[in-house]
Amino acid sequence: MSKKVEPLPLRQSNDGRWEVENDSGIWIKCKNEEDAKILSKAPIVLQESFEVFHPNEKVAAKLDETAEKMEQYNMSLGSRYFREMAKCARGNRREIA
C-alpha cells in the first residue's frame, strides 16, 4: 500500500490571484484557479503514474496536462519529467534521464 500523497497548498492572494506553493516553499502566482488546481495536484498525478503497471492513457493525459502547466509557469525541469512519465504511462518504458 502506498503512502497517501497530498496536493500542494493553494491560496488566493489579496489581489485575487491564485497561488500554489511548490516543494521549496515558494508561492507561484497563477493566471487562474484552474491552473493553480492543476499544479496543486501534481504530486497526486505523479503518484498515480507510479502505480500504473499497464499502459494507461488517462494517467498519461493527466501527466501531459500537468507538464503543460509546469512549462507555462517556467517549471521546465518538472515539465520534462512529467512528459517522460507520460511516455512511460503509455507503455514506452525507457530509462528516464
Image (spheres, helix red, strand yellow):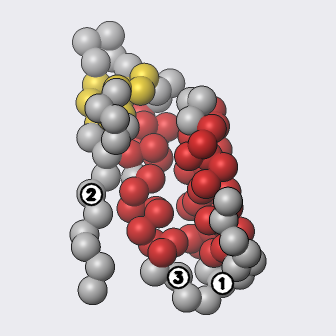
Q: Which residue is mark 2?
A: 6
Q: How many numbered marks, from 0 up?
A: 3
Q: Residues within 10 Å of mark 3 (few under 14, many from 20)?
A: some
**Residue displayed at 60% across by 56% down:** 82
Query: Disc 3 or 2, which lies upstream in sequence?
Result: 2
Query: Disc 2 or 1, which lies upstream in sequence?
Result: 2
* Figure quadrant of the N terminus: bottom left
Q: Secondary structure at mark 2?
A: loop
Amino acid type of the residue tagged 2 in the rendering? Glu
- Which percent across, then down, holds residue 13? 28, 18
Which of these two is toward me, 60 or 12?
A: 60
Amino acid type of the residue tagged 3 in the rendering? Val
Q: Secondary structure at mark 1?
A: loop
User: Badges 2 and 1: C-beta atoms under 8 Å apart?
Assistant: no
- Which percent across, then down, holds residue 70? 57, 40
Q: Residues within 10 Å of mark 2 (few under 14, many from 20)?
A: few
The tag on residue 52 is 3
**Residue displayed at 39% across by 56% down:** 43
The reply to whether residue 6 is visible in this rendering is: yes
**Residue displayed at 70% across by 79% down:** 93
Classify residue 53 by image quadrant.
bottom right
Q: Which residue is mark 1?
A: 55
Q: Is residue 58 above or below residue 22?
A: below
User: Badges 1 and 3: C-beta atoms under 8 Å apart?
Assistant: yes
Q: Secondary structure at mark 3?
A: loop
